[in-house]
Image (spheres, grey):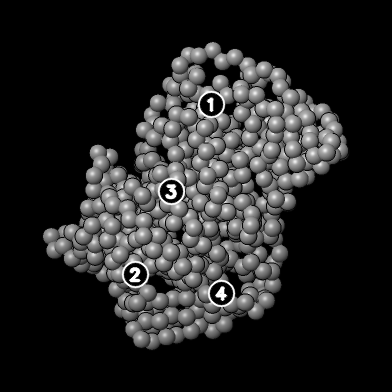
Amino acid sequence: MNFFWRCFPITLALGCLMLWQTLAAPERKKKAMYGDNRPLKIVRVTLNDARAERFGKVELTLDLQADYANPFDPQAIKVDAVFQAPSGKTLRVPGFLWQNFTRRLDGQAEKVSPDGLPAWKVRFTPEEAGEYAYTVRAVNKGREVVSPRGRFTAAESKKHGFIRTQPGSRYLRFADGTPYFALGQNVCWFSHRGTFDYDDYFKKMAESGCNYTRIWMSPWSVGIEWGVDTPHHGPQGEFPGLGRYNPGNAWRLDYILERAEKYGIHVMLCFLVHGEFRTTSDDPRQNMWRGNPYWEGLGGPCEKPEDFFNNREARGLFKRRMRYMVARWGYSTGVLSWEFFNEVDIIDRYVSTEAVAWHKEMARYLRSIDPFRHPITTSYASPGGDPEMWKLPEMDYTQTHFYTGDVEGAMEQWTRRNQSYGKPHLVGEFGADWAGGRWTEDDPTGIHLHNGLWISALSGDLGNAMLWWWDNYVAPQNLYYHFKALSEFVTGAPWNEGSWQPISAEGIPEGIRAVGLQNGQQALLWLQNRNHSWQARVRGKSVAPAPEARIRLKGLPAGKWRLEWWDTYQGQIERTEEVSGQEGVLEIRVPALETDVAVKVVAPG
């Protein structure tokens, strides 16, 4: 029996009718979908909680009647709410159809089941304290209705709000001005355990000081739009086809984002994955075009993957999907940013002018419907990306992905090069080898992870570099302590104060790598024995300590300074000392280094 017919009775009194979707390919099964067939009317608008607070979630539940077959098509049924803030500013937020689910583990596999009847929702986050007024507007078949005006009061809170870019700064900050420095790793999808994986990941990450992750809306994870009866390599759940969205996966993403917010973890949410637009690969998750509902073989408008960028109907359908995503998840202060593509350059055929034009159009549309102004980015498999993309003002920060044996050298090179666009930068993926699966044996203690984290964090990126291998390396090897040590060192640094620049130093011997930042008031420095690498371990080389050195730091005012020498594995201060600088030069004595050490240079007292 069909999934939705089995789980939802037809309730005429409430107008929750199940309608069959007919696809262009006649041999494919018809799928059930939500619909209604009553005259347009907003019966009631219910506020979830009258005790609203600044930067807290406000949710409206609508008792809405209308006549439509597809609730995800704003040409058929369009719901918006307009909120008037205490300052008089108005914000328009789209509404969406919601269905609750419950989850359980069946053996080691997650199963989600519908719970109750669907309902229309509006989600909003007040950024001001004080009294708000709101109305809900619905348009259906040429008719429009508007609800009576409602009100709520948002109390002040200790929440920091949304994360935003800052003009002229390489760092991000919260809406209340608190600095945000991203600490974390990729956790892009789940296993057969579904959302239960994130219960474990987020708990361990939060305990290790992490506040960032990246999640793909891939067909095998929390993707919401995919072909009917086509492989998606994910957990149980039904994809209703082009222009209609998977309610179970949408609920899963609700759960994941709420869980992330509980643990203080902020999510880069990636909309599209390169494999959805490829036809040649031995990996079935990188060869998925013939399951993509935009393909003409499934009734979509595109013959070839690259048509997705140029086809007018495809662009309109994707804008519709973005409207739904903003309606459902735009409210969340746990969403750090929107990422259009994972590695857009390795689709079947990448054409710079077409991809750049598409990103520009989509980013402008996304910004026009997102009242919460989440930053926007995209990503490339090539470390250099596409300069024309990164020059777009619509791209709020740049991103680098790379995989190479020389993690340390590549981290310095690509971080420096991609910061040249004058925007914040993040190493969104890195690893010593893209193929993976060997790190438990080759680098069980995470040397390449450790070195990559510290170089990126103290090179001027908006956060640490994000390792790729979370499920088969970091978790089973329990390498979270690397994040914890870095978190202890950088937390509390005044990232919003002064202009942080790469530190200038003299007298650095060949055997030591020195990476650091200073803002004229303090400095953060990482010193590494260049011979201490994962490659040396694999080759069985004996790593001799780097000899003692005297390094002269430049750019700090003359006077006394306190040096805090940090153990980069324990995240603890090993010792402190006071030194004096003269005429903008501060000399520090570096002991012999077996591995590495971090130094904070701060004013005494």
The 10 Å Cα crowd at callout 1, few under 14, some 14 to 19, many 20 or more, is some
Which callout, 4 or 3, points at the residue further toward the start of the chain? 4
The 10 Å Cα crowd at callout 4, few under 14, some 14 to 19, many 20 or more, is some
Which callout, 1 or 3, points at the residue further toward the start of the chain? 3
Kindly identify the residue that appears in the image at 54 percent across and 61 percent down: 374
Residue carrying label 4: 91
| Label 4 vs label 2, nearer the camera | 2
Q: In 3D space, how far apart are the residues under numbered discs 1 and 4 (Cα atoms)? A: 48 Å
Regarding mark 1 in the picture, which secondary structure is present there?
Answer: helix
Kindly identify the residue that appears in the image at 72 percent across and 28 percent down: 551
- The extreme bottom residue here reads 143
Kind of residue at badge 2:
Gly
Residue carrying label 1: 447
Depth check, front residue: 200 or 86:
86
C-beta proximity under 8 Å, tags 1 and 4: no
Q: In 3D space, how far apart are the residues under numbered discs 4 and 3 (Cα atoms)? A: 35 Å
Residue 385, numbered circle: 3
Which callout, 3 or 2, points at the residue further toward the start of the chain? 2
Depth check, front residue: 487 or 551:
551
C-beta proximity under 8 Å, tags 1 and 3: no
Which callout, 4 or 2, points at the residue further toward the start of the chain? 4
Q: In 3D space, how far apart are the residues under numbered discs 2 and 1 (Cα atoms)? A: 46 Å
The quarter of the rendered structure image containing the N terminus is bottom left
Kindly identify the residue that appears in the image at 63 percent across and 39 percent down: 458
- Report the side of 243 relative to 443 (left or right): left
Kind of residue at badge 3:
Gly
- Report the side of 402 relative to 89 (left or right): left
The quarter of the rendered structure image containing the C terminus is top right
* Image height of 159 relative to 385, above or below: below
| Label 1 vs label 3, nearer the camera | 3
Kind of residue at badge 1:
Ile
| Label 1 vs label 4, nearer the camera | 1
